[in-house]
Amino acid sequence: MSERFHPDGDRIPEPEEPASPGLLARARGHLMDVTPLRISRDFRSLFVGRSISDFGDGIVEVVVPFQIYDLTRSTLAVGLLGLCTLIPVLVFPIVGGAVADAVERRRLVIVTHTFLALLSLLLAVNALLPEPMLWPLYVFATLSAGVGTFNRPALSTWPARLLDPGLLPSANALESGIGSLDYMVAPVVAGVLIAVIEPAGAFLFDAATFLVVIAMVLRMRPSPPAEDAERFGWASIKEGFRFLKGKRTIQSVFLADLNAMVFAFPLALFPAVAADRLDGGPVLLGLLYGAIAAGSLLASVFSGQAKHVRRQGRAIMVAIVVWAAAIVVFGFSTTAWLSIAMLTIAGAGDMVSGIFRTTILQAAVQDRFRGRLDGIGMAVWATGPSLGDLESGVVASVWSVPGSIVSGGVLTIVGIGVLRWFAPGFWHYDARHPTP
């Protein structure tokens, strides 16, 4: 190769060949990508605020049923909490999504978290009474579920306004990972708080977390609605549903998740599996529940390459097949270690699917529709696990627990095959050219 020279006679050095990355650098590339936190101050504030809010939610989800059982000694009374939250999680996300598209989001989040903080303060007052009342706990469960899900579309779609589309998978992995960690640690902290400062103190702690969230959101810039956003009303809600017509990618996102949750979500059978299949007790039951969250956390930690995945529809379908296959092996398992391992793998598959489901909804949907579509998605994702519990329980009662689990996993894999056949565009979806 001939040498090159500057006009002044100095030799131009030849460019060095880039060194191939070492093993450590390659391994680091697979770890969680924190670029969104590094480059966006507003995303950092939102991330910290949501993390603290989810942590407080995880604590309350333990404290409220504990206090109800402590007051009544009735499992039925505790079970009624599910009835209190059913309607709010189906209706409020859809309404909240329409509101999120029509108003300034920072103000909306501050108002809703102020209301949630007041609810927790009222529960603390109730817990300090000589004879705490039962009905406020049910009212709190209903209102907090409603306000929380009403508020969620605004929070979930906000990162799409703060980051480039290529960084959305990394942002979703970060948020999902810290969410999994929150729900692993929060129950333990809740138990300590109940023992040390009693339910009243735990509710005060929850109220304090909401105040921290408000402080973090106040640090962010205002986020006004899109210029072509519609005013909130029944017409805007209907417009959100009309937007779904013909949008095969978004429809496939919802169908893929429903398929996995309805057929292969056997959490209602875990107590029977722990006691009858595995001859275990409450500790083993807790490990079965925790294994899915542990798998989700592991998938988030090693999500560094998620931002490079272009065929995101394909990634969702493959991840759901991994989830379902692990559930099938779990259904056949008669040993604790294999059951826990399979549920950990299933949790990892579910997390990968969730990262890209959220990413597609953020990137492929116009900003003026994002809140409404996220609200519809939340209603779908809240319905799926409830239907899954019902399906697995019914099949187990007329057949067997292993038969219910295994058949559900097989049906999920078949369902993904059917979706691949009827929605080839979803399989070939390219994140570089996001289309709904």
Image (spheres, rainbow, N blue to C red):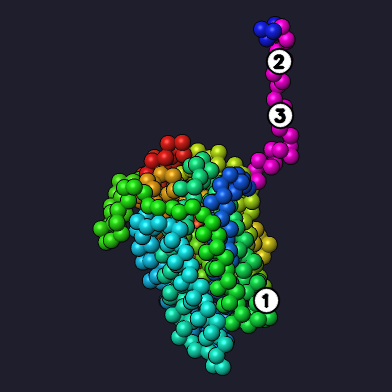
Q: Name the disc covering residue 68, or none.
A: none
Alpha carbon separation for disc pair 1 and 2: 64 Å
Q: Nearer the viewer, mark 1 or mark 2?
A: 2
Q: Is residue 227 left or right of residue 56?
A: left
Residue underneath mark 1 = 192
Q: Nearer the viewer, residue 319 or 116?
A: 116
Q: In this picture, is 242 found above or below 190? A: above
The magenta stretch is 9-31
Report how far apart the C-alphas of labels 2 and 3 lie in the structure: 18 Å
Q: Mark 3 Cα within 10 Å, few/some/many (few <14, many 20+)?
A: few
| Quarter of the image with the N terminus in it | top right
The residue that disc 3 covers is 20
* Position of residue 344 in the picture relative to residue 68 (left or right): right
Viewer-closest of 2 and 427: 2
> What label does residue 14 carry, if any?
2
Residue lying at 43% horizontally and 74% vertically, measured from the top left: 143
Residue 406, compared with residue 397, is above or below; it is above
Front residue of 142/274: it is 142
Circle 2 Cα neighbour tier, 10 Å, few/some/many (<14 / 14–19 / ≥20): few
Q: Earlier in the sequence, mark 2 or mark 3?
A: 2
Q: What's under tag 2, amino acid-wise? A: Glu
Figure check: 336 above or below 128? above
The residue at the point 65 percent across, 43 percent down is 30
Q: Looking at the picture, which amino acid does disc 1 mark?
A: Val
* Spatial separation of the CA atoms under disc 3 and disc 1: 50 Å
